[in-house]
Amino acid sequence: MGKALNANFSLDELIDGIPGLMMTGGAAEICGLSCDSRQTVAGDLFFALPGVNCDGEAYVTAAIAAGAVAVVLSRQPKIDYKVPVVVAANIRQVMAHVAQRFYGDPSADMLVIGVTGTNGKTTTSYLLESILQQAGYRPAIFGTVDYRYAETKIPATHTTPESISLLEYIAEFRSAGADALVLEVSSHALEQHRVDGVHFDVAIFTNLTPEHLDYHADMDSYFASKARLFDLAPARGGVINLDDSYGVWLKEQHPEARSFSRLQKADIGLESIVADAAGLQAQLTIGEHRLAFSSPMVGEFNQSNILAAAAAAHCASIAPEDIVAGISNAPQVPGRLERVANNRQVLALVDYAHSSDALHQVLSALAGIAAGRRITLVGCGGDRDPNKRPLMAATAVRSSDLAILTSDNPRSEDPLEILEQMRAGALEAGAELNCAQALSGEAGFVIIAERRAAIEFAASLARAGDLLLVAGKGHEDYQILGNQKIHFDDREELRRAFACDVVREGGQL
């Protein structure tokens, strides 16, 4: 994947002291690390990662042909690869520690804050970026939207990249001047040891709701993966949301952690709350401090995100005045209740909510905002947990005057089959309409399979004072159809639809 910033290493140096390894085949000088044979170059140490659908060992020959001078396997090889072979019982954990050594332990002298939880990670990371900048830090950010520092922005392939990529990026950002790091940490990353080579100062737990259950066996397994961030012993402590039942459980396991809450007494809280369509005004309570702030963010869940960022900053010894200034000056978070301007006085919002709980939270937050007709457009991704599809559709129908069900990223699945699963949940919550009924103002749901047509139809319905939420894709600027990735941005489509004032016929399933 990459090359160390300062020097090459012998294979012996890279694996020295790591327990449980077996090595055969002699010495090698390592110039880089890789876990993808397509990106392997001469001098690389190649990690043959086991996978769900394929085994990395199937690509060892290709990696060696590309120039790999040594390989790490999860079991004894069946053939002689003619290069040094290291066998590791936990290959991903070993990869993280080797990458940490290869890239010079880049996070060791940085302030590092990790954020985990089902919802809120991205917004919390943007808030922390603003707070850290206010306090004089130069933060790098890794998350669902991108990996960025200063003018460098790398589109995110995963919420948390593989350890090789992660530590290389951290090393490069540190070399460019970064002295702090905010890292969204997914359950996959924790389960797969991607962050084992990172020194965390502060760990944040936002919440836990059903998600990724196509990967995790059940909610307890999902929680155990998230909780592992706290097992990595953050140097300055953890912060936990007491308004979440799993947060209460986690606090029992880590009583030393600081707490935050909107609803009960905690180490960090809010008072004198005034929330409306313009945003939030409140007082942040940190010990004896009472500090007023304002934010354009709407919704109770964003109040929790603000508290999470404030609590983490407090753990990192940032002055309360810098915390509230950073919150007040934080920019719009891409695709998180992002407002789309229009000349029709419609409150048009694009959000990343792609689970039933996330959608429920967003719609509940918007319920407190005065509006005329409430229109929600939503789809469900293919090759993901199918159990959430009827739940998401039912949530949209129950919380809206009109729900428009459409495609998201169908991937390898038939989008009409996904919509049929959504339709089953929608029918339990409301009436199915045709487009003429929807145009006349009747309540219920319609199905328009093509997302662009669905957005155009939604925009054509919206009038002054209405609230239109386009949910599911948020910041994403693509749509995955089969094995093709095409450009598609809900924000662009919504702006275009409002500008053109298009009224387009929509077909039903």
Image: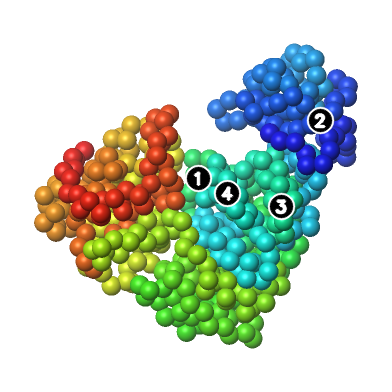
Q: Position of residue 367 (x, y in %)?
A: 32, 68
Which residue does the numbered mark 1 point to in the structure image?
A: 212
- Cα–Cα span, label 1 and label 2: 36 Å
Q: Residues within 10 Å of mark 3 (few under 14, many from 20)?
A: few
Q: Amino acid at mark 2?
A: Ile
Chain-order first, disc 3 or disc 1: 3
Q: Earlier in the sequence, mark 1 or mark 4?
A: 4
Q: Are marks 1 and 4 in contact (CB under 8 Å)?
A: no
Q: Earlier in the sequence, mark 1 or mark 2?
A: 2
Q: Quadrant of the N terminus?
A: top right
Indicate the secondary structure of the residue bearing disc 2: strand
So how many labels did they put on this image? 4
Q: Which residue is mark 4?
A: 153
Residue bearing mark 3: 176
Foreground disc of the pair 1, 2: 2
Name the kind of residue labelled 3 in the image: Ala
